[in-house]
């Protein structure tokens, strides 16, 4: 088989780098992450343990969406982000484009997502050559989480944490109008801990052991809903456009505790709400930043993508 000339290899590299640049610029414009999934982060969050070797298999390339150590070097589509990858990338491209075999890559599998343990450049070149699969040695991790290539790990963990929270508290049945949702999975444990502490206080006051459902209903009526109402009256939620009412409830409760510790006096919830909005409100800043990001992204795209000439 003939080896592709250096000029064609260089052209493929330039096309891959240009596509990576445009992909990153569009991701910034749309405020979406285009990063590969970090195996270290996913492993920590899902508490992965003890992989077992599966076998040597053909893996669909569109399911390879993460990396063990090179997740910042490539986009989610495994396009190269930095020129320091060029020499090795082009050498591998020369071999693969000529039809010669390259060693199988090594992958970890978590759910339906594969993470590159060894072979990031080979995966990148294979995708650029339009191949559909890659030969790989695969180690699998057992996980109950339905992880997909396009999954947002934090969002997935939030859904799982919310499901566990609802199974324990039955708030969705007791107070269906509340629809408590958080953007950080650890917050559900905080809410559950607060409810349990509230249950102890009420049990001591009533001199009897309240059921968890009784405590949940009273917590909703006497604690959660009044605070959410205060935030609504002061239009606090509008200052945090990417957060939920439950997020702000937790922030507000913590902010009140901090203010009371600093002032050495009781602090009204309204005071804490005003202080939270004044010190941490992000609505105007986020809007301005988004406009700036969009304009910069458009400018960057125009520099690498020439405008299509208009027909006369």
Image (cartoon, helix red, strand yellow):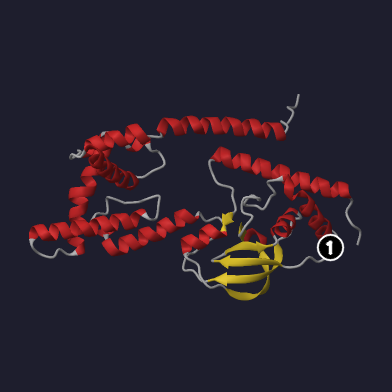
Residue pushed farthest left? 207
Residue 301 shows in the view: yes
Secondary structure state at the residue bearing disc 1: loop
Point 52% across, 62% down: residue: 43
Residue 128 image position (x, y, % from top left): 74, 53
**Along the line of sight, which residue is nearer the eye, 98 or 140?**
140
205 lies left or right of 147: left
Residue pushed farthest top? 312
Q: Quadrant of the C terminus?
A: top right
Dividing the picture into quadrants, the one containing residue 114 is bottom right
Residue 261 image position (x, y, % from top left): 24, 42
Q: Residues within 10 Å of mark 1 (few under 14, many from 20)?
A: few
Residue pushed farthest right? 2
Residue 224 image position (x, y, % from top left): 24, 48
291 lies left or right of 198: right
Residue for badge 1: 99
Number of on-image labels: 1
Residue 235 shows in the view: no
Note whether 267 is above or below 213 in the view shown: above
Note whether 168 is above or below 88 in the view shown: below
Point 19% across, 50% down: residue: 221
Point 74% across, 28% down: residue: 309
Dividing the picture into quadrants, the one containing residue 132 is bottom right
Point 13% across, 65% down: residue: 209
Q: Quadrant of the N terminus?
A: bottom right
51 lies left or right of 221: right
């Amino acid at each position: 088989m003939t080896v592709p000339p250096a000029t064609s290899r260089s052209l493929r590299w330039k096309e891959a780098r240009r596509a990576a640049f445009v992909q990153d610029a569009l991701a910034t414009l749309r405020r979406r992450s285009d990063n590969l999934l970090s195996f270290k982060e996913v492993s920590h969050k899902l508490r992965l343990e003890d992989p077992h070797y599966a076998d040597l298999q053909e893996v669909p390339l569109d399911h390879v969406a993460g990396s063990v150590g090179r997740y910042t070097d490539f986009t989610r589509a495994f396009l190269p982000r930095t020129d320091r990858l060029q020499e090795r990338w082009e050498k591998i491209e020369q071999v693969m484009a000529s039809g010669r075999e390259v060693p199988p890559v090594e992958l970890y599998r978590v759910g339906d997502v594969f993470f590159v343990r060894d072979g990031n450049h080979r995966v990148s070149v294979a995708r650029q050559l339009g191949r559909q699969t890659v030969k790989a040695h695969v180690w699998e991790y057992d996980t109950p989480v339905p992880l997909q290539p396009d999954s947002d790990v934090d969002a997935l963990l939030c859904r799982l944490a919310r499901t566990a929270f609802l199974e324990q508290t039955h708030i969705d049945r007791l107070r269906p109008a509340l629809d408590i949702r958080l953007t950080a999975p650890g917050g559900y444990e905080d809410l559950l801990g607060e409810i349990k502490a509230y249950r102890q206080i009420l049990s001591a006051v009533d001199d009897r052991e309240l059921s968890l459902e009784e405590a949940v209903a009273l917590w909703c009526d006497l604690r959660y809903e009044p605070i959410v109402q205060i935030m609504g009256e002061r239009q606090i939620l509008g200052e945090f456009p990417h957060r939920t009412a439950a997020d702000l409830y937790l922030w507000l409760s913590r902010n009140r505790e901090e203010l009371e510790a600093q002032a050495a006096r009781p602090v009204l919830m309204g005071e804490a709400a005003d202080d939270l909005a004044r010190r941490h409100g992000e609505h105007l800043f986020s809007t301005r930043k988004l406009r700036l990001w969009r304009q910069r992204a458009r400018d960057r795209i125009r520099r690498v993508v020439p405008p299509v000439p208009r027909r006369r």
